[in-house]
Amino acid sequence: MISLHINGKYYTIEDDPATPLLWVLRDSLGLKGTKYGCGIGQCGACSVMVDGVSIRSCTLPVETVTDKTIVTIEGIGTEHKLHPVQEAWIAEDVPQCGYCQSGQIISAVSLLDQNPNPSLQDIKKAMDGNLCRCGTYNRIEKAILRVKSI
Amino acid sequence: MERRFFLKSTSFGAGGLLISSFIGFMGCETEPVEPWEPNFFLRIMPDGTVEFSCPQSEIGQGTSTGLTQILADELGADWDKIKIQLADGSYEKFPGTQGTGGSNGIRKLWEPLRKAAAMAREMLILAASKKWDVLPVDCYAKDGFVHSTKTQLKIAFEELLSLVKDEYPSEDIAYKKESDYQYIGKSISGHKNKKIVTGSLEYSMDVTLPNMVYARIVRCPVFGGVVKHFNADAVEKMPGVIKIVQIEPIPVFENDFVGGVRSGIAVLADSSWRAIKASELLEITWDYGANASLDENAIFKEFEKNEKAVNPIDGGAFSDFPNALIEETISARYTIPYQANACMEPLNSVAFHKGYEVEVWAGTQSPQMTRERIAELTGLPLASVIIHNKFAGGGFGRRFFTDFVEEAIILSGKVRRPVKLIWTREDTISASKYHPYTVEYWSAHLGKNNTFLGFSNRGYFTRASNYPSYLYGKPIRFHESIQNSAKQLLPRASWRSVMAYPWGFGMESFMDEVAHKLGKDPLAFRLELLGEADVSSLNRNPESPYQLDARRLRKTLETASQKSGYTKTTKEGRAFGVSAIMYNYSYCAHIAEVSVNEGQLKVHKFTSVVDCGKVINPSQVKSQIEGSIVWGLTALLKGCITLKEGRVQQSNFHDYPLLRYSETPEIEVHLIASDHMPTGVGEPGVPGVAPAVLNAIHNATGIRLRDAPVLEIPSTLEAQG
């Protein structure tokens, strides 16, 4: 039995300890906002925050995060109480298909938590690991700049 | 702008009135209030919610938001009270308007959806006017209420539900005036954005059903190959593994790559991860079949051989020119590799084959066709096949095809439990359906004194009959499409802009080559040819509100020139490149700005101008063009699918890379204000991206590149070939 601390709650699971956190979140805990995109840490759709840092959950064995604080997209904000980054995403009409956006927002929140006033270069560096097939990159940049200017 | 029509007409097209739902229900006061469904598009609930049943799929192209704006305005609804659901696959309810492809959603539904909403609005107004004893003409609908202009009274739609059932729609109805629009033309943020940013939008990948099992299939890596034998002893003993199933192949048809299933072995387990992990341990021996010795080079040789047999066919649009006039011909050949769609949400579906009925949850672009295929596959009547369409994490044409649903049905049929079939990323890159490898041959014929007579084109597809997108005012000779075996080597998928991609790639590159040959500025040359174009013969139906017009393409190009500060020569280290494309009645011009330093290409900026008729949602239109540019740059500069011994060599994003944020240029999109009928924007931006960049590279370096992908810029002119 493994216990996890996710979005301020404690969970116990019975998955194989080597199971990637992504699949524990999705299949065992029903936290499906975190997405499967590539399984090899290349696309960022599965990003979650582990102790405040954006990390790829698809290659992260669940046994390695038992003593960590995990935040998934469900822990960032809700439809009724949006995080400023989520509000900016809506204001800039960022999403197209939306599948990568959980991961994009996790990376953006992680960046802004650590560096509330990022330069364009900081933004490029922090966000370059998150792929978007629809091509929403320039709007993501605008949304992050919008949060920064608040 | 008011259009009048008779309701007695029996042909309502998509979303015809459900007359039975309001006949014979004589409004007994004590009867509980029931939802009112005046047609297949919408239902008004007792709590005031307006449910919109959206026939088009939502794969990120934004159509469901645009259609909701149209519905909201014509009905007079309150935006916040509209609930949008994707309609189940139903030809009966939505004939001809449910397939999502060809950037046709807004174009196909603009008229029937407005008609359906306007009819419902008029019936609500009739009910209110009777209640108040005022004339209907003194009432209007807005914000979910019917208002009276004479009495200042207003009543909510939901309070009219028991009354409106007694109403028949009036015989002629006026559409709302444009000046009364509250939503059409506004940049309303996508309706599903709030759910997306909180991670709560449900894709088919997120569907969970009681007693559901998870499946992954290992498919034959060579298309056409089959399982010879396999050993699953170790896999069967793994924890969570429920069943191993051999998938018998279902062939695809020569001209229909819609369905078909590859030979393979499926592992069904109690979680996604266990199914994936267990499948990797299968020991399978394959009979690879005839394709195991082939690669794209074999196809290229075949193209080259067959290209020599030149059979002109009817040019369709333009009068030809006699061979005797031709003094010189210049020619060029363009090649495009196989491409994968690589939607961010890997292909997947959830299916439950109950024996007597089948239910499917899938993000599909073809809910009706999927239903038909599944009925055929299972032998069940159409009525017993239910396709729930889900929001999809990208489609780009790939989700038009039904293979990933067929597989789940086969598996569910074996276990009689709901099955969630997951394609891994590797499956979507290595064992999928692909945009085909294509070769395009272009020639320009010159007469005496370098006069330009016209073009010849020969390529993978036959244009003249099915693709009238050539708007330039010079004759063009089409030739029969080149026969080749590429179709058998890998199955074909639609891929954002489909045939227009190789066509636009060649045409818009070659336009520049001809301009340079004639000593003309490439942009001015295009303006000249578009200026003298009479394309009326391309418009086969003079009654249609959609008519091709070369002047509209010309205007986008002129505007792009002005907005970008285009010059023929390099400015501040940047060279400009131009393209102009019409795709399904939308017009798009691109101007790319690039620099090349020591073989390193940088795409700095795109200035793009679109004329898609009346703009429903400017933000979403611009989004689609921005996305099209990223799509086009990925295709040109990043990914490509290659074959060796019949096997796809790429497997995931490390070797099939997509354009990243740091590589994305500044993008400026301008929209042409227009009163023309609204048309689509998902694809028209794609075909011109690569040629604009290639033309800019030529202007920067003098090097003409004709083969995608362009992974490096050669340092010498030898590349010109």
Image (cartoon, coloured by chain):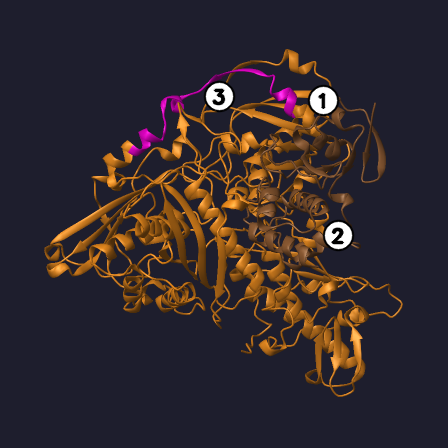
Task: State the hue of chain B.
Answer: orange
Q: How much space separates mark 3 and mark 2, taking CA atoms?
A: 51 Å
**Does residue A34 belong to the magenta stretch?**
no
In the displayed structure image, the side of residue B223 where residue A73 appears, left or right: right
Q: Are marks 1 and 3 on the same chain?
A: no
Q: Position of residue B653 (x, y in %)?
A: 53, 34
Magenta residues (range): B276-300
Tell me the crowding category of disc 1: few under 14, some 14 to 19, or many 20 or more residues within 10 angstroms, Cα based. Answer: few
In the displayed structure image, the side of residue B190 where residue B490 appears, left or right: left
* Secondary structure under the numbered disc 1 in the rendered image: loop
Q: Amino acid at mark 2?
A: His
Q: How much space separates mark 1 and mark 2, taking CA atoms?
A: 32 Å
- At 49% from the left edge and 45% from the top edge, which residue is drawn? B663
- At 63% from the left edge and 77% from the top edge, which residue is drawn? B180
Q: Residue furthest bottom?
A: B150
Q: Chain of mark 1?
A: A
Q: Nearer the viewer, mark 1 or mark 2?
A: 2
B348 or B572, which is in the foreground?
B572
Q: Amino acid at mark 1?
A: Ala
**Does residue B293 belong to the magenta stretch?**
yes
Q: Nearer the viewer, mark 3 or mark 2?
A: 2
* Secondary structure under the numbered disc 2 in the rendered image: loop
Vertical arrangement, residue B236 with respect to residue B701, above or below: above
Q: Position of residue B445 (x, y in %)?
A: 18, 54
Which quadrant of the structure image shows residue A5? top right
Q: Which residue is mark 2?
A: A83
Evaluate if marks 1 and 2 touch, with contact meaning CB atoms under 8 Å apart: no
Q: Which chain is brown?
A: A
Q: Chain of mark 3?
A: B
Q: Are marks 3 and 2 on the same chain?
A: no
Q: Which residue is mark 3?
A: B226
